[in-house]
Amino acid sequence: MPRLSINGKENDFREGESLLDVIRGAGIDIPTLCHDDRLKPFGGCRLCMVEVDQGRLVTACTTQAAEGMKVETHSSAVESLRRTNLTLLAEGFPADEPLNEHFQFQRYLLQYGIGPRGARSHEFKDDTHPYLRVDMDKCVYCYRCVRICAELQGQFVWRAWNRGERTRILPTRTEGVSPAPDCRGAAADQAPSMLESDCVSCGACADTCPSGAIMDKAIAEKGVPKVWTRTTCPYCGTGCEMEMGSTDGEIIVARPLASAPVNKGHLCVKGRYAHAFVHAKDRVMKPLIRKNGQWEEVSWEDAYHFTASRLHEIIDKHGPQAVGVLGSARASNEENYLAQKFSRVVVGSNNVDCCARICHGPTAAALKASFGTGAATNSFNDIEVAAAFLICGANPTENHPIVGARIKQAVLDGARLIVIDPRRTELAAYADVHLQIQPGTNVAILNSIAHVIIEEGLVDRAFVDSRTEEYDRFVDLVQPWTAEQGAKICGVCAEDIRRAARIYAQSSPAMIFHGLGTTEHSQGTEGVRGLANLALLTGNVGKPGSGENPLRGQNNVQGSAHMGCEPSNLAGYTPIAQSAEWVEEVWGRPVPREQGLNWMQMLDASGEGTLKALYAIGYDVYFSNPNSNQTRESLKKLDLVIIQDLFMNETAREFGDVFLPVCSSYEKDGTFMNSERRVQRIRKAIPVLGDSRPDWQVICELAAQMGFAKEFAFESPKDIWNEVRKIWKAGAGISYERIEDGGLQWPCLSEDDPGTTILHRDKFPLGPKAPFSIAEYTPTKEVTNAEFPFLLSTGRTLFQFNAGTMTERTPNVVLRPTDTLDICPADAEELGVQNGQTVRITSRWGSTELPARIDDRIRKGELYATFHDPKVFMNRVTSNYRDGKTGAAEYKVTAVKVERI
Ligand code: SF4
């Protein structure tokens, strides 16, 4: 290893390291202002100056370490220069600002004993944003905000306007909808305020700003948190790690964790800021039982007694098949494991499921059928390796914002991008090819891309011959799917299909991401298998930067199903027939063999009167399910509805009999599993609030009340996890001790197994060869006609999350107050609809009202609506159709009409 000397001491370094890296690696602290490890070296502030080889002053951040260098980090020349630079900066910093060592620049002033001497010059000040406070009087022109907004988030909100002494750093706004589809455009103007800017509220500027010019409003109002606790975000399936800052049991703010493998020092608006729900005034803090139509507070003992005796009555009278249990995608792995154990051991039925049924059920089924494992093949760290991306039915910059930001950066760095989506999403605006298909035609477009790859000789023959089967049948299947045929069915241009096929097949490696725009269709499973077909055709399996990667919606939806909240599979997603005997040995109890009902079947059974009781853990089923009119009819027939949640959700409000109040993930320990199979820790950042309890404790106590204390005698989440590891062989190596820092990806078979970042490198769990899927395209039954002329898709927005249970109780409502119906300008004009005007939207299934938002990302004849606001209840409109293989709901296509009110 090469060596250099720092302050007279020899140090090793690696080729390519900067002097700053080596100096800090040696444990020596030197001041920096413009430097941030997340950004490219800048060399602007000159505080990191060091003396090299007796007399040469260089900026340590931009100078590469070289063999034999002699570096002095605190020589008198260097220190004098630092003092001069800090003094110059202090002359512009307001003298009346009390210095706070939380901010790096202010800390240096305190350290060097330099007092600020500037006057208030009334630069840009802004207090309009719910999370950020801006006071540009305090700006030291290090440009970290400008650079982090461009280099990490890719949003380009902060820009330097004017030149020389007149340079000012101000936020920008691009005309159109927010978040803007592509903020690189020179057409952006100075924004009148932060709230009206293109800001996506990731907080990276506040996180990096060393002077306090841009800061978290919570810190300005409540002070710097006293305690910081490492945990994992409770929102999407990206699985970002962060530190929750709290003071005296109150969460103040979160900050990203630089060492986190997934987010690498970045968070989105939800992870960083949307935590106020924890302290919301309407959080249920005591158990409730509905008596004579009214909720009454009761003790935990009474709640358990009531619930257990009602469950016993129903099981005694109607048998265990009359009870259904739903695990929660927002609860921990340990809690979901207990939920399915409760169903199988306490109730005696396999009627257990989770929300994966209505979202990514098709992903698990399809990837299992294609490759043998129903989960992402690769890792997020492959994003920077991929030469091209194919993103199908996913909007990562809003729904998985950290993944979206990483993909955006990769594309800005030269990776190719194909987007298949009916809407012009933000990433579509960056794409080489955007196939803006008609909703419901995924299978057709994928067959057509496959046809072109075969027709143009772009198939990886070596891979196909050695690692796939059914190729000839697949060639026959896609033979009629010429680019022209695909174009006709999908409503796109044939040449664009050819371009997409060439880019995907010729840019190696190429990585596929898909989301609910692929799965929530009547052919959801076939859609995912269509993507797997493309990966197999081109050899994009089992190597870095490739594969087929679902973006799971909620933080632990992967873990929820994987822990056994699934009627056909036990923990580890292993079929009951395959693993029941082994599980019985661990449990000391029989595993029921009778086929269980999935969630949609439970709902049907409830409508038919055969399901009598539902235990819904952290899942607002009434609000989330499609076709809520029919859901209501089914739910109201139940004799017993047990709700376990933080809030009186719509299901509880309308149908609940007993409410068991539980705490948030910030108040307990456990693990989540993210989209890339990574098991990560969640940690208790604040004490449990009120009389709520962790889900795991409630399930154990209820089980004990029902006579199963021994089987549920767990002292802690770690205890539960250790039982999971006995059952789930592919997770056996994942101990709590090993995931203290960054988590591990399964399969991880033993405690010396480093885990698996890429699946299927040499073989598949199915055997040596993976089969192509041979699935014909079947059009959706939701078709337009004169009465229902529009096709509606529903989905999420950046600022809200699913049923709104959490985000609706945070200042995110300022950023996105309610759901909208997005409509293109031409259709709005024809209907005479103005931006913001309330409209009625009606399908064959129901009707609701919400404000219209004119949005040129939408194609004529199509609509897009979000579904977070219970006042809107968008699922009154969505249909009853389901994926033929898994029962997942067809949320993405509903024929509707729109009327002005
Ligand atoms: Fe949380 Fe997802 Fe945002 Fe990361 S990207 S901070 S996991 S919501």
Image (cartoon, helix red, strand yellow):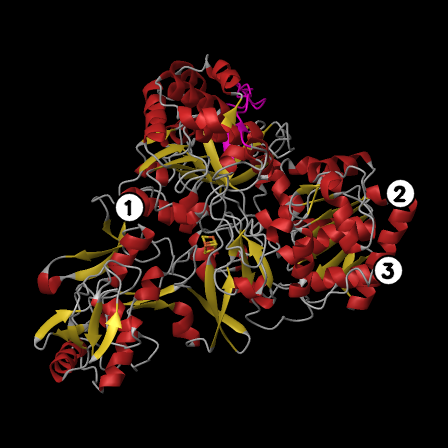
683 up-or-down from 460: above or below: below
Where is residue 162 shown, x and y percent of the image? 13, 57
663 up-or-down from 535: above or below: below
Where is residue 105 shown, x and y percent of the image? 26, 75
CA separation in Å, label 3 and label 2: 19 Å
Residue at figure coordinates x 44%, y 31% from the top left: 535
Number of numbered markers: 3
* Label 3 crowd (10 A; few <14 / some 14-19 / many >=20): few
Residue 529 located left or right of residue 630: left
Q: In this orientation, which residue lies closer to the viewer: 297 or 532?
A: 532
Task: Name the image quarter holding the N terminus.
Answer: bottom left
Where is residue 128 shown, x and y percent of the image? 36, 61
- Tag 1 secondary structure: loop
Main SS of the magenta part reads loop
Q: Are marks 3 and 2 in contact (CB under 8 Å)?
A: no
Residue at the spot of label 3: 707
Nearest to the eye among marks 3 and 2: give it: 3
Residue found at the very far bottom of the displayed protein = 113
Where is residue 420 shown, x and y percent of the image? 41, 31
712 up-or-down from 503: above or below: below
Residue at the spot of label 1: 183
Q: In this orientation, which residue lies closer to the viewer: 90 or 50?
A: 50
Q: Amino acid at mark 3?
A: Gly
Task: State the image quarter where residue 841 is shown.
Answer: top right
The numbered mark, 1 or 2, whose residue comes first in the sequence reads 1
The numbered mark, 3 or 1, whose residue comes first in the sequence reads 1
The numbered mark, 3 or 2, whose residue comes first in the sequence reads 2
User: Residues in magenta?
Assistant: 768-793
Residue at the spot of label 2: 318
